[in-house]
Image (cartoon, rainbow, N blue to C red):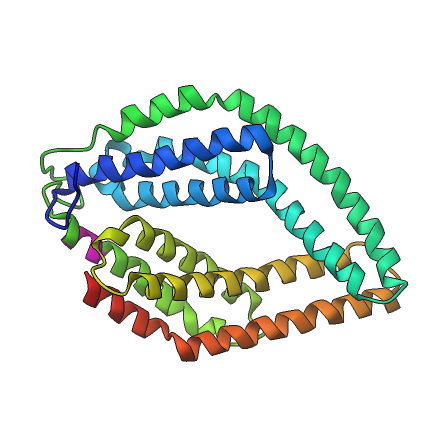
């Protein structure tokens, strides 16, 4: 089936959700075989895209797809701890090699603890995934996603016969308006919480753009690259904030802790500088205009 901007929403929603679901369950099977860092990351991203798809098309489904969303969120959360541990191991191993002793020795203890945690989390993830039963979960998804509302109802926020193009324009603008309101606070370097909140908003906007990418007539690659760059930059800043807290909890000597925290702070300053550059090179306002113009 070919989905276009003129396709009624009730027809387009099941098809687009099915594509996201196929990707999700395909990556789920891959993780069960490997538990590889990249495979885990890809499944986590796929789960978030599927959740964004559920949020996007919720208005034309009974119960707003809440049951599907909860099941996918379980997978996202299960993967989160293992992903965070993997990222910490990569970061601290690289940092330990770059810093002089006794920093490497202090970080070695932290790394060893994270290695043990990683194996425990891998085993826990394997056990929990077996209990989730991907086949049964997929059947439930397929049944739910195949049954959108077909006829207008007084309690529906949108007419199921609305053309997908019109619905997409409004849905993307909704995410963008929320995102744009968060930018001023995030532009202040010390506002880590504001930058974290903006990162989440950018992530949702990116996934919504990806789901509806075939409707963006021109410039999609440039738009997507800019939004992804923002997400990655803000994500790195958040990771560095988390790593700093990990170091503070480690009980290192004040001298060693100071050197390590300064090294992390230096990287964060560089990330914030990159964020500032992105604001100049690809202003959010311009991205919004490009998306509106392309639909």
The C terminus sits in image quarter:
bottom left
Q: Residue at x 27, y 65 (%)?
A: 219
Where does residue 83 sit, x and y in percent of width and height? 60, 45
Q: Is residue 34 magenta?
A: no
Q: Residue at x 39, y 45 (%)?
A: 49
The picture places residue 223, in percent across and down from the top left corner, at 33, 65
Q: Is residue 157 above or below residue 146?
A: below
Residue 12 falls left or right of residue 125? left
Relative vertical location of residue 30 with respect to residue 96 in this rendering, above or below: above
Which residues are drawn in magenta?
Answer: 166-170
Where's residue 52, x and y in %? 36, 46
Residue found farthest to the bottom: 280
Question: Which is more toward the observer, 63 or 69?
Answer: 69
Q: Say which quadrant the N terminus sits in.
A: top left
Q: Nearer the viewer, residue 204 or 186?
A: 204
Q: Nearer the viewer, residue 75 or 98?
A: 98
Query: Which residue appears at 41% of the width and 78% of the height?
Result: 281
Residue 117 is situated, as x and y percent measured from the top left of the image, at: 73, 39
């Amino acid at each position: 089936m070919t989905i276009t901007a003129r396709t009624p929403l009730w027809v387009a929603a099941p098809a687009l959700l099915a594509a996201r679901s196929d990707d999700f369950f395909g990556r789920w099977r891959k993780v069960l075989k490997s538990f590889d860092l990249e495979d885990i990351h890809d499944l986590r991203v796929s789960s978030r895209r599927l959740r964004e798809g559920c949020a996007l098309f919720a208005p034309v489904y009974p119960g707003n797809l809440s049951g599907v969303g909860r099941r996918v969120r379980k997978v996202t959360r299960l993967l989160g701890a293992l992903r965070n541990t993997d990222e910490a191991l990569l970061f601290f191993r690289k940092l330990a090699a770059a810093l002089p002793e006794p920093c490497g020795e202090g970080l070695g203890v932290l790394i060893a603890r994270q290695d043990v945690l990683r194996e425990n989390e891998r085993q826990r993830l394997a056990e929990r995934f077996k209990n989730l039963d991907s086949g049964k979960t997929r059947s439930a998804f397929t049944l739910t996603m195949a049954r959108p509302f077909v006829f207008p109802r007084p309690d529906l926020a949108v007419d199921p016969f609305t053309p997908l193009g019109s619905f997409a324009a409004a849905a993307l603008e909704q995410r963008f308006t929320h995102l744009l309101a968060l930018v001023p606070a995030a532009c202040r370097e010390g506002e880590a919480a504001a930058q974290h909140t903006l990162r989440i908003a950018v992530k949702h906007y990116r996934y919504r753009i990806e789901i509806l990418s075939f409707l963006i007539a021109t410039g999609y690659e440039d738009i997507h690259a800019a939004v992804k760059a923002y997400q990655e930059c803000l994500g790195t800043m958040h990771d560095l904030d988390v790593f700093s807290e990990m170091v503070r909890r480690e009980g290192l000597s004040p001298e060693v802790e100071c050197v390590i925290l300064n090294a992390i702070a230096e990287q964060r300053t560089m990330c914030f500088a990159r964020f500032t550059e992105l604001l100049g090179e690809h202003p959010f306002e311009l991205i919004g205009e490009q998306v509106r113009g392309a639909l």
